[in-house]
Amino acid sequence: MINKLKEMREAKTITQEELANKVGVTARTIISLEKGQYKPSIMLAYKLSLFF
């Protein structure tokens, strides 16, 4: 699966920290997700899908 999180976040013109606050994680988690270094839990994936 292609990781488009950074692209989608930038399209909404929000920072990594703002997105992290919206979905209840740290900015470091968002950074790791965007770099493909971390796979989200089902709950986090769900929260991200609701946001976008």
Image: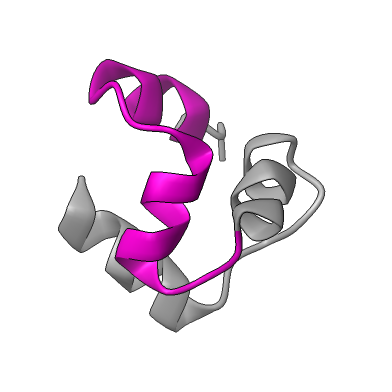
Where is residue 18? Give x, y as percent: 38, 47
At a point 26% along the width and 57% down the height, the residue shown is 49
Where is residue 51? Give x, y as percent: 20, 54
Q: Answer left or right for 37 relative to 3.
A: right
Where is residue 5? Give x, y as percent: 47, 36
Front residue of 36 and 22: 22
Residue 1 sits above or below residue 22 on the image: above
Q: Answer left or right for 23 relative to 52.
A: right
Q: Answer left or right for 52 relative to 1.
A: left
At a point 59% along the width and 50% down the height, the residue shown is 30
At a point 42% along the width and 74% down the height, the residue shown is 24
At a point 44% along the width and 33% down the height, the residue shown is 15
- Quadrant assignment, res 2: top right
Look at the image and say whether residue 12 sits in the magenta stretch.
yes
| Extent of the magenta region | 5-26
Look at the image and say whether residue 39 sits in the magenta stretch.
no
Residue 22 sits above or below residue 31 on the image: below
Residue 11 sits above or below residue 50 on the image: above
Which part of the image, by quadrant, shows the N terminus?
A: top right
Q: Residue furthest bottom?
A: 43
